[in-house]
Amino acid sequence: MFTRKKIIVACFIALFGVNEVLAASISTRVRVLESKVAKQDRVVKSLKSDYQAQSSLVKNELSKVHALEAKLDQLLKQQKGNKQGKTDKRYAFP
């Protein structure tokens, strides 16, 4: 009976020891996953800020292009009006 008692005590000790090892393993996994999530969060935030900066730059440049298109249309209308109504007298003799 003495050996049976030792075996039961050893089993309980082993059971609690395995339980603590599993708990430590789980907490280590959780810490690793938390660090990975934090790293991905930083990457996503930096990509978001880069995207917003590029988006504002594209909008700015697009507004410049639209302004140039408007000026070009205005110049083409002026040139068309000059050809239809008036003749070019820059090289004509007086």
Image (cartoon, rainbow, N blue to C red):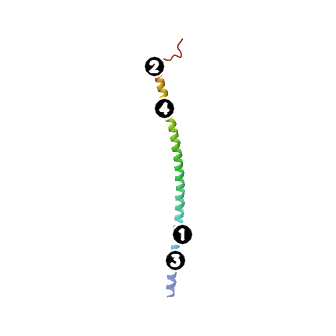
- The residue under label 1 is 24
Q: Residues within 10 Å of mark 3 (few under 14, many from 20)?
A: few
- CA gap between label 1 and label 3 equals 15 Å
- CA gap between label 3 and label 4 equals 83 Å
Residue 1, image x, y percentages: 49, 88
**Of callouts 3 and 4, the N-terminal one:** 3
- The residue under label 4 is 70
Query: In this rendering, which labeled residue sits more in front, label 1 or label 3?
Result: 1
Query: In this rendering, which labeled residue sits more in front, label 3 or label 2?
Result: 2
- The residue under label 3 is 14
Query: In this rendering, which labeled residue sits more in front, label 2 or label 1?
Result: 2
- CA gap between label 2 and label 1 equals 91 Å
Amino acid type for the residue under numbered disc 3: Ala
- CA gap between label 1 and label 4 equals 69 Å
Identify the disc placed on residue 50.
Answer: none
Q: Secondary structure at mark 4?
A: helix
Q: Residue at x 52, y 77 (%)?
A: 14
Residue 52, image x, y percentages: 52, 47
Q: Pointer 1 and pointer 3: residues touching (CB < 8 Å)?
A: no
